Amino acid sequence: MAARFASAWQSAAIAILVVATPTPLIAAPNPDDHFSKTFSACMDAAGGSTLPMHDCMAAEYADWDKALNAVYQTRMASRDPVAKTQLRDEERAWLKRTKAKCEHAGDDNAGGSLQGIEIQSCYLDETILRTLDLRGRH
């Protein structure tokens, strides 16, 4: 009887551990891993000077925005009307969330030369992440 009790106790303990153990999460992509070599070289050449950094970010953002628009159009073309509406609404919500987030990204540097860099960086990162998200869908 003691063996049966111990076995039941062990089974219960294992069940609790299995349920209580968190499932491994897939790490979110890091936008920095997806910057172009041209952008990285441009930022290195900027040497921390904000004016050239703005130019580097603007060029990289333009490339990613173009990629985002292309993948969005591809996804829209392959969807039925209900799914198109859903994707359109999702995209509009993403745009609204991104604007709310990024317009305040530079608040810690308000009035300083880094405020614009922080805002641009936020928009670039969010655009990269959205592009990767849409690319991963079928």
Image (cartoon, rainbow, N blue to C red):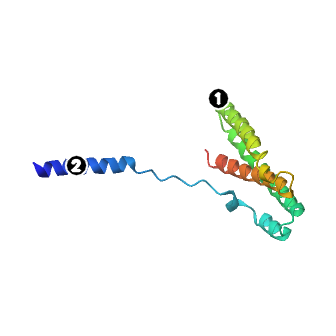
Up/down of 92 relative to 114, above or below: above
> What percent of the width, then of the height, locates residue 89?
69, 33
> What percent of the width, then of the height, locates residue 45?
84, 70
> What percent of the width, then of the height, locates residue 37?
76, 66
The quadrant holding residue 50 is bottom right
Q: Which residue is mark 2?
A: 9
Q: Nearer the viewer, residue 55 or 79?
A: 55
Residue type highlighted by circle 2: Trp
Residue type highlighted by circle 1: Val
> What percent of the width, then of the height, locates residue 24?
47, 53
Q: Which residue is mark 1?
A: 82
The residue positioned 80% from the left and 57% from the top of the image is: 60
Q: Nearer the viewer, residue 78 or 33?
A: 33
Indicate which label's residue lies in the foreground, 1 or 2: 2
From this viewpoint, which residue is outermost toward the top?
82
From this viewpoint, which residue is outermost toward the left?
1
Q: Is residue 106 left or right of residue 14?
A: right
